[in-house]
Image: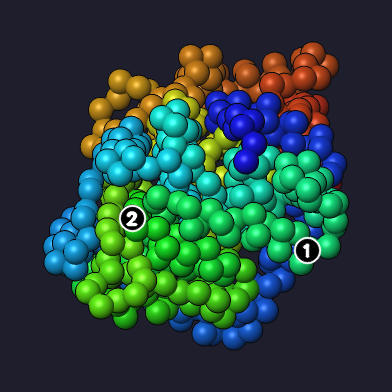
Amino acid sequence: MNSQPVTLYPSRQFKDNARAALADTELRGSLRSAMDFLMAKRSSAFPDTDELDALRTLGEAIRQRCLSRLPELLEQLEERLTANGVTVHWAETPAQANAIIHGLVAARNGTLMVKGKSMVSEEIELNHHLEAHGIQALESDMGEYIVQMAGEKPTHIIMPAIHKTKAQIARLFHEKLPDTPYTEDVDALIRIGRNALREAYLQADVGLSGVNFAVAETGTLCLVENEGNGRMCTTVPDLHIAITGIEKVVEKLEDVVPLYSLLTRSAIGQPITTYFNMISGPRRPGEKDGPREVHLVLLDNGRSQAYADQQLRKTLQCIRCGACMNHCPVYSRIGGHAYGTTYPGPIGEIISPHLLGLENTRDLPTASSLCGACGEVCPVRIPIPEMLMRLREESQRPAGEAVDHPLRGQGAAASTTEALAWRAWRRVYASPGTYRLFGWSATRLRALTPPTQAGWTQNHVPMTPAPKTLHELVREREARRKES
């Protein structure tokens, strides 16, 4: 593997990143064709709109029921997993999660971890932490493997390398993998990647995976995948570490079925994935394969902040299908890297402020046209536009204002100039005399309207007062009526 450092995309630079992405014609072409394909696949996966509506209603009800009992279900999950032989760890912050995982690997003098797809491990930047301690963390999901080799971060939560063309991947493999001929044949590229990864499974000291659903009733960790790498990571190494956010718990095994159907069909238009793994414990006496130890790390990292607020709690309903990204007109033009966060697109705009604080994500809630497409396709009916409006309000709310559930970074986008402007607007509109004087002056001085008006004129023509006020027009009409 290459040793090129991963290029980080800080969310504070969203506007600059977005401008750079818009100027990249190759990127825009790749994204447009990919999003069109994924939207068509999702549409074909739900031919019956009545079934889709009923399934979404059921999925929403399941997620809301489970979230309403989240503390209780987490305790039950820990109890069941412990009884099954799985060790459960709790981490409030990324630093704590990294320390737990590093400690488990270091206790076995491990030097190689092979990873299945896990967005939470991206969230805590586990790879960088382990590499700083001399442990190689090798991605085995093909998309993750490609972006890791390229020294990049994933650009989509389901398809990490969706922004890359087959020509770019062909060049990457040719340059980074020894004795690899240049080929743009997709099947050949997949075989090349699989062959390069095969030996790593046998050599790895530790396997790490994410979790799609954690079932409290049975103490079962469910993994959804198509490549088989997740199964290899969780069965070949002697130590399996799973990591997930605390919101992924569901109450019963039967809750998984409708959520699984919604996930696969919403994400990539498949009725079911090639592999569905259910892990309930380590290898038992007499069994020939499986890890000898299984650990689960449950991460908070700001999720309890969203949970505490009745409205913002709906953010945690997400099952990470990526449908909102695929249908978002903003994401489809700038891609995931522009957001500078682990979770890009509409879901990233509402979850990242809780993970990173509004002070680091203040531009993300405004990175939306509020067209509503994300809310219309969300399989569990998260009202994403409503969440965006709430976060915009919180980012503008004065930092010192007392509220029931303050968000980290409250008031990050507040502007003294803007506050003064709104205060002046309120005074003008509160007084009829002042309002009429303002209108009269604006119409007479309309020639002095500035051609550039902050961010407005980036996408609109300048706002210019009409030649006459509404009151004047009405008076003139009444005068003409009387004359006639």
Residue 463 in which image quadrant: top right
Name the one closer to the observer, 344 or 399: 344
Q: What residue is shown at x 23% (from left), y 37% (from top)?
A: 404
In this picture, residue 113 sits left or right of residue 80: right
- The image's colour scheme reads rainbow
Q: What residue is shown at x 30% (from left), y 44% (from top)?
A: 108
Per the model, the C-alpha gap separating discs 2 and 1 is 32 Å
Residue 301 in which image quadrant: top left
In the rendered image, the vertical position of residue 396 relative to residue 445, given as above or below: below
Residue identifier under label 1: 188
Residue identifier under label 2: 239
Measuring from the top left, give residue 420's x and y in whole percent. 49, 15
For the residue marked with disc 2, what is the amino acid? Answer: Leu
In this picture, residue 216 sits left or right of residue 189: left
Q: Quadrant of the N terminus?
A: top right
For the residue marked with disc 1, what is the amino acid? Answer: Ala
Measuring from the top left, give residue 122's x and y in whole percent. 48, 43
In the rendered image, the vertical position of residue 359 relative to residue 243, given as above or below: above
